[in-house]
Amino acid sequence: MSDPTSLPSFPPPADEHPLRGRVLDVLVDMGAQPNLDTDGDVAYQANEQTIFVRVTEGELPVMRIFGQWTLPDEVASDTAKVSATCNEVNLSLNCVKTGVANNTLVVTSEHLVVPGAEVATLVQVSTSIILSAVQLWHERALGLEPGQGQSDQSGPPQDEAGPEANGSTPGQGS
């Protein structure tokens, strides 16, 4: 009998997580170097920000692309301002929604992925609109002129704790 550690490591079958596999392929093709976390979410970097993809497989697969950022101290305590800013951004942009949980801004774009859908286009467009939305959110919340908050990154420093930061998982049950 041969040593099991000497056997090659095979990837999971293609039909086990087909949409997540397509997402991983797209991100590799983009040069994004994706990683899987313990929940099966795909994490990747875009403009020095961590973005996540959560896939729900099934008859109608859903792809949720999202990022999360810790709120700046100057607005975190003003819940009315935070809520108004989320509402304003949600009404201003298509295909994106914002929300706040435990002083963490979550910006997400969700898609039903029908057979034949261009996953690459959905990932690229969603990534761009998420980064634009977080920039817009911070400009509005901090009272900055458009582009004034622009730096080498889109938005504030990323909360590196991942989707389970502060003991909550954005999007669970939504």
Image: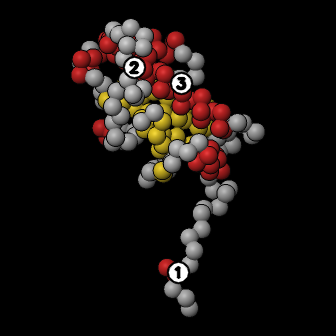
Q: Quadrant of the N terminus?
A: bottom right
Residue lying at the far bottom in this picture: please name it: 1
Q: Position of residue 23 (x, y in %)?
A: 60, 44
| Numbered disc 2: secondary structure | loop
Residue 58 falls in which quadrant of the image? top right
| Numbered disc 1: secondary structure | helix
Which of the two discs, 2 and 3, sits closer to the camera? 2
Residue annotated with mark 2: 150
Residue 159 falls in which quadrant of the image? top left
User: Label for residue 6?
Assistant: 1
Residues under labels 1 and 3: Cα distance? 45 Å
Q: Residues within 10 Å of mark 1 (few under 14, many from 20)?
A: few
Q: Position of residue 66 (x, y in %)?
A: 48, 33
* N-terminal-most mark, 1 or 3: 1
Q: The residue under label 2 is which amino acid type?
A: Gln
Residue annotated with mark 3: 129
Q: The residue under label 1 is which amino acid type?
A: Ser
Q: Residues within 10 Å of mark 3 (few under 14, many from 20)?
A: some
112 sits to left or right of 144: right
Q: The residue under label 3 is which amino acid type?
A: Ile
Residues under labels 2 and 3: Cα distance? 15 Å
Tag count: 3
| Numbered disc 3: secondary structure | helix
Residue 47 falls in which quadrant of the image? top left
Residue lying at the far right in this picture: please name it: 116
Check the image and report above or below for 114 versus 8.
Answer: above
